[in-house]
Amino acid sequence: MNSIVLLGSTGSIGVNTLIIAKRYGIEIEALVAGQNIDLLNKQIAKYNPKFVSIANCKDRDRVNHSKVFCGESGILELLEQSKSPTVVNALVGYAGLAPTIRAIELGRKVALANKESLVVAGEFIDISKIFPIDSEHFGLWYLMNSRPISKLYITASGGAFRDWDIKDMHNAKFSDALKHPNWSMGNKITIDSATMTNKLFELLEAKWLFGTTNIDAYIEKKSIIHALVEFVDGSTTAHFAGVDMKLPIAFALKERVEDAILPPVDLLKMGSVEFLPIKADRYPIWEIKEHILANPHLGVVVNASNEEAIKRFEKDECNFFEMSKIILDAYKKFENIKARDIDEIIEIDKEVREYVKGDR
């Protein structure tokens, strides 16, 4: 069956996925959205899904569809009833973990844009069922081509505050952190980009996807180079592509793409490109980079504390740098904890959130 289930249909990844699906005649069996019911209704009218799920049951009457699930359990029930071989998971945050696990249990391929699934529980996820939609991991996959590698690199834009004076960053507001220089993304990932937590997550994802901890990240302000691979033969290749997620989405849905998805990068007009180190004075979360790559099971601690810290920052209950302090404090508190299964992951997530919420 040439169809997909799309989780997170109203976000930027979801919208681009629908564009690619239409291009290749792929049917949309199910749409899962959050609270943007107006856009969801437009998608329902255009793509005629068999099933729909939304975040809040109170919005059910606003949805123009006869088969509407709601809440976290609704997504899992929708997955049970659907038949599509591919599930695109573009949900944001920890909420994306349970659907990833259930989809794999049901034998589906997961086109994964939900970073938190691997960050929180990569040890318990069958990586063979995952195709990454992140531009960085797609770039690494595209370059590697089953050749022996010695080191992987991903790039970062530097986020909203990359050019700010550090002393001014102490007074930065939530709205300031949303002004990303290169991308248009949702609130959480844009905040994570500003703190560099997003890039820490991507290093953890790469560890699980490609089975190595010999990974690093550098700032490349133009966001033209997304990944670099050093091979054991001494050569290095780089992945150049425009700032557009349609290319990794097309490969995730089709596996083989032989037509033009994006205009090529004109290297002759690109000008100079530089790679800058990520420094802990501007991005304090970077202090734990080496430790967490060596102890990737602690991703659940970083993710839970990060989600709670972002909520505080949005409510103006902490400043920009205090978000990282909250995460680093929780990381130290729970550094000796290790889950043995998914149930323990869920318990640790709850414990960390309770600890962070109680630390007022």
Image (cartoon, helix red, strand yellow):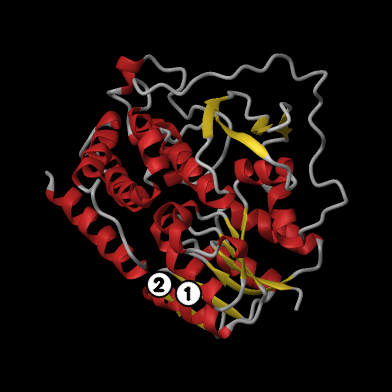
From the viewer's perspective, is 71 left or right of 44?
Answer: left
Q: Residue furthest front?
A: 233
Check disc 2 and report the residue beneath it.
72
Residue 85: x and y, percent? 67, 74
Q: Residue at x 48, y 82 (%)?
A: 77
Vertical order, 181 against 12 (above or below): above
From the viewer's perspective, is 356 left or right of 183?
Answer: left
Vertical order, 326 against 87 (above or below): above
As helix, strand or loop, the secondary structure at mark 2 comes to helix
Residue 209: x and y, percent? 57, 51
Q: Quadrant of residue 64?
A: bottom right
Q: Quadrant of the N terminus?
A: bottom right
Residue 64 visible in rendering: no
Residue 309 visible in rendering: yes
Residue 92: x and y, percent? 46, 55
Check disc 1 and report the residue beneath it.
75
Q: Residue at x 37, y 41 (%)?
A: 292
CB under 8 Å between discs 1 and 2:
yes
